[in-house]
Image (spheres, rainbow, N blue to C red):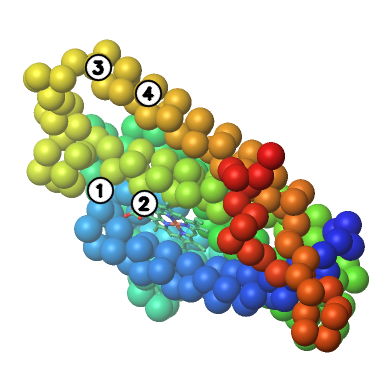
Amino acid sequence: MKNKHLEIAKPSFKIALVIATIFSLAQLLTGHKSAEGVARNQPAKLAAMEGHFDSSGVADMYILGWVNKKKQTTSGIKIPGGLSFLLHQDFKTPVTGLNTFRPEDRPSQINAVFQFYHIMVAIGMALIGLTLYASWQWKRGNLFNRKWLMVVFVWAVLLPQIANQAGWFAAEMGRQPWVVYNLLRTSDALSKAVKAEQVLVSLIMFMLVYLILFILFLYLLNKKIKLGPVMHKADNGNEIEMSSKRENPLMTK
Ligand code: HEM
């Protein structure tokens, strides 16, 4: 973006782009496999992820939406029969809905599960779009002429982190009220030895430790970027840019 260290920045960016493109596409496949597994093993969770109530009806796939738990309806922009298609390869086969389960056996936060799941999938699709678009621009020789694209890539670093958190929220809230699906309820799995306050304290400790590590990571990363690659003299006398073991930011003053 600042036209500095281009000799090392451009190839590095291209390597990262190839890897990001492959893995964002692979994420769709693994995500799809996960969804099939959830449909098999935790059908109430899958129904909550798509806000699907009616077991006798086809299941739609929502791009965006809102679940009304009281009215047992979901509204939004959808692909009619999309979930049926993903699971059964046709748009008509019914999918187990939330009304198959007793209210006490359903996740209590259906809309939250739906939203977290959709945030994750939306980010997954956005990353696919972004990396494919950038690869196409590369092919056309325009990759580094698009300043806005470079800016988007800087901020896109945050997206997988958000998707990770959203994915975990969807997975963990969606499995409620079970710790072991259909066998052990969360309320029956509470430890008699460890008190809630103790769990809270260790959670806070973990959060603090990870927060400190994260801040340290950002600090070191920023320092490393500002330092840039070390210049070396090539055999022909020209200066070339190279990363070097010597430039460990912890060692530099
Ligand atoms: C591209 C579309 C995606 C689909 C279809 C998808 C699908 C799924 C499904 C069905 C689950 C629930 C698994 C379970 O409860 O057992 C899940 C969980 C999760 N996803 Fe995604 N996902 C996608 C994108 C992403 C992205 C981009 C990330 C992060 C970079 C991500 C990170 C996670 C995490 C951390 C979990 C929780 C861990 C787990 O249960 O395996 N997902 N995903």
Q: Mark 1 or mark 2, which is nearer to you?
A: 2
Left or right of 113? Residue 108 is left
Tag 3 residue: 198
Q: In which quarter of the image is the C terminus?
A: top right
Instruction: Locate residue 87: give its quadrant.
Output: bottom left
Asked whether 134 or 49 is in front, the reply is 134
Disc 3 versus disc 4: nearer the observer: 4
Q: Which labelled disc corresponds to residue 47?
A: 2
Disc on res. 193: none
Label 1: how many Cα within 10 Å (few below 14, some 14–19, many 20+): some
Say if 93 sits above or below 157 in the image.
Answer: below
Around disc 4, counting alpha carbons within 10 Å, would you say few (fewer than 14), some (14 to 19), or many (20 or more)?
few
Ligand 1 located in image quadrant: bottom left
Q: Is residue 113 left or right of residue 118?
A: left
Q: Mark 1 points at which residue?
A: 100
Mark 4 vs mark 2, foreground winner is: 4
Q: Element type at marker 3?
A: helix
Marks 3 and 1, the one that precedes in the sequence? 1
Tell me where residue 3 sits by quadrant.
bottom right
Label 3 and label 2: CA atoms lie apart by: 34 Å
Please name the amino acid that badge 4 sits on: Met
Disc 4 and disc 1 in contact, CB within 8 angstroms: no
Q: Are marks 4 and 2 in contact (CB under 8 Å)?
A: no
Amino acid at the residue labelled 2: Ala
Amino acid carrying label 3: it is Gln
Please tell me whether mark 3 or mark 1 is closer to you in this view: 3
* Label 4 vs 2, first from the N-terminus: 2
